């Protein structure tokens, strides 16, 4: 085999390798960007479940990832409650402001100048 043929084979092999590692890198970056583990087998029912169970029915202690997941869920729940209460406060405040503006408009209309004299008599006759 001459040197020229060997170089072509080497380029072909490295070209294929580069293509496959590029897609693997893209998949890794995609999973990391969405908060997923890099290795899809790193988490799941087999890895997250308890390693053993007690025969008398006692619960097994929580695993580290289970504790972290519970803490994260609590934090998200607290954030949801906080944001929803802020949203409700903003809605109530907006309705109060709208009601006050409507009352001001109505007061202005009620305090408008009223017809007097002949204009009042013409209005009553009509």
Image (cartoon, helix red, strand yellow):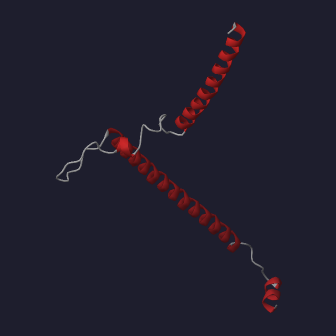
Q: Is residue 115 left or right of residue 15?
A: right
Q: Kindly give the residue lying farthest to the top in the view shown.
A: 3
Q: Kindly give the residue lying farthest to the front in the view shown.
A: 1
Which of 78/92 is in front?
A: 78
Report x, y in % for residue 106.
66, 71
Q: Is residue 124 left or right of residue 48?
A: right
Residue 20, compared with residue 93, is above or below; it is above
Figure disc tally: 0
Which residue is rendered at x = 38% and y = 48% of the image?
Answer: 74
Report x, y in % for residue 88.
51, 59
Report x, y in % for residue 34.
54, 40
Position of the N terminus by quadrant: top right
Q: Is residue 40 left or right of residue 6?
A: left
Q: For residue 117, what is the image quadrant?
A: bottom right
Position of the C terminus by quadrant: bottom right
Residue 86, compared with residue 117, is above or below; it is above
Q: Is residue 32 left or right of residue 78?
A: right
């Amino acid at each position: 085999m001459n040197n020229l043929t060997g170089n072509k084979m080497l380029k072909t092999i490295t070209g294929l390798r580069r293509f496959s590692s590029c897609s693997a890198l893209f998949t890794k970056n995609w999973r990391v960007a969405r908060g997923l583990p890099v290795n899809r087998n790193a988490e799941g029912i087999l890895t997250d479940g308890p390693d053993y169970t007690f025969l008398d029915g006692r619960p097994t202690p929580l695993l580290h990832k289970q504790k972290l997941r519970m803490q994260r869920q609590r934090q998200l729940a607290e954030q949801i409650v906080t944001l929803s209460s802020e949203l409700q406060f903003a809605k109530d405040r907006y309705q109060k402001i709208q009601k006050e503006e409507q009352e001001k408009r109505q007061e202005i209309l009620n305090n408008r100048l009223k017809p007097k004299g002949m204009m009042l008599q013409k209005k009553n006759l009509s």
